Image (cartoon, grey):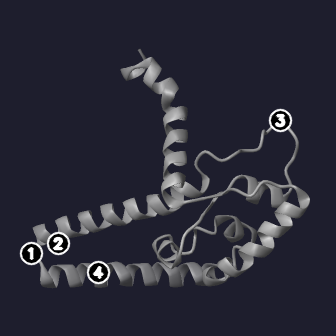
Amino acid sequence: PLRERAVSALLLTAHFALYATLLLSTLSPGRAIVFALVLHALFGLHLGMAFAPNHKGMEMPDPDGERWGHLQRQVLTSRNVRGAVVTDWFLGGLNYQIEHHLFPSMPRPNLRLAQPLVKAHCSRIGMPYAETGLIESYRQALSHMHEVGEPLRQRGPRGT
């Protein structure tokens, strides 16, 4: 609705104004810009490290093949990342990606509680449930990106 968009726009503008005010009141303009760029680069790296291992290299439905139902689409295209409380914190609870996609409105702390139920259901119906450690998830994601980038490396620069 229009009202929600207006409120979002107002809050985003207020956030940006407060952020810029705080930066410029504590740092010189040059340092404020460098600080903001470094902060956003690090935040982007963190987001990439949190999102990439959950989907890269996972099975994708064949557009011309069998139609997947909701459960198949969410479970087969996602991977969970095993870990303790530190992993949950670092990944913002999104290491329970399968449960997050099945129950998107569920509060993230509860995803850990839903996992055994989802895992048991998948086992009961014979559906693969992908789960791996953090380092292995990065290895799988990077291997997949290396594999899909192979044709570009074969052609060389500028498509030669």
Q: How far apart are marks 3 and 1 (CA)?
A: 57 Å
Q: Distance between the residues labelled 4 and 2?
A: 10 Å
Q: How far apart are marks 1 and 4 (CA)?
A: 14 Å
Residue depicted at x 51% and y 40%: 143
Q: What residue type is labelled 2?
A: Ala
Q: Mark 3 points at which residue?
A: 64
Q: Distance between the residues labelled 2 and 3?
A: 51 Å
Q: Which amino acid does label 4 sit on?
A: Tyr
Number of marks in the rendered image: 4
Mark number, residue 32: 2
The quadrant of the rendering that contains the C terminus is: top left
Mark number, residue 28: 1
Counting residues from the start of the chain, the first of labels 3 and 1 encountered is 1
Q: Which amino acid does label 1 sit on?
A: Ser
Residue depicted at x 25% and y 63%: 37
Could you say which is closer to the camera, residue 2 or residue 125?
125
Q: Mark 4 points at which residue?
A: 19
Query: At numbered mark 2, what does the secondary structure look like: helix, strand or loop?
Result: helix
Q: How far apart are marks 3 and 4 (CA)?
A: 48 Å
